[in-house]
Image (tube, grey):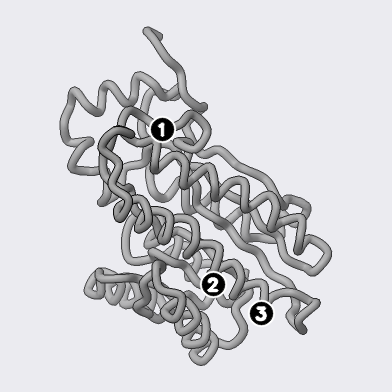
Amino acid sequence: MSGVLLITGGASGIGAETARRAARRGYKVAINYRSRDAQAMGVAADIAAQDGEAVAIPGDMANEADIVRLFNETERVFGRITHLVNSAGIGGGGMRVEAFDAAALHKLFAVNVVGLMLCCREAARRMSTKHGGKGGAIVNVSSMAGTIGGRPGASHYAASKAAVDSFTMGFAKDVAAEGIRVNSLRPGMVLTEMTEDRLKDDAFRTGIESTIAMGRVGRAEEIADAILWLLSNEASFISGARVDASGGGFVFGAR
């Protein structure tokens, strides 16, 4: 593949692994990050060491001006953006409904939903044939949490991801005739920097894996490969889909 790929939240976890693998497939990769500058620069350096092209660009997904600047800077460096992966997101912390804090909820939805939607807006303005573009492909990273209301204490996070899925379906219909494909990918529990501390607890990990049909958590590279397939021409007739990358889905009770 070739093209210009912008990945939000690309400094670590699924985003970073997607960046590395995308570069090996010929993409020019813009790696967005908010505060993990050393990690983002490290991913870009890894790509450069393999003769790939990458740039790390800061930007807060809760800030509209940062999002616009991110897209403009990516195109200044690499030319027109052809692919987008919205991987940036926050968990919001464990919180039962009676403990909800309005500021925390606003921040969660500002990043996970509004920021993602604004990134899609900027992509559509550049990719759509209606606006002089040549089409493109977008993957919004959602979560299996959005399908079940989340695990205990995560209903707010689950709601944000359900919003991503709903938006993805509607957006895909809006731009399908304008050369843009849009899909959401819903990972289950995946071992990343964000989850590794909790998964070091054997009891916690065993409990989680008992609810996964395959009996294990996922790996970042498995999710990255699914994202890259959805971006590729091999998925040319797939848009508006919600693809589960969850090890067979949730199971409950003794197996």
Q: Amino acid at mark 2?
A: Leu
Q: Which residue is mark 1?
A: 150
Q: Secondary structure at mark 3?
A: helix
Distance of mark 1 from mark 2, alpha carbons?
30 Å
Nearer to me, 72 or 55: 72
Q: Amino acid at mark 1?
A: Gly
Q: Secondary structure at mark 1?
A: loop
Nearer to me, 213 or 57: 57
Q: Which residue is mark 2?
A: 5
Left or right position of 97 against 146: left
Q: Earlier in the sequence, mark 1 or mark 2?
A: 2
Q: Are marks 1 and 2 in contact (CB under 8 Å)?
A: no
Tally of numbered discs: 3
Q: Which mark is residue 126?
A: 3
Residue 246, position as x, y percentages in the image: 48, 34
Q: Is residue 53 among the parts visible in the rendering?
A: no
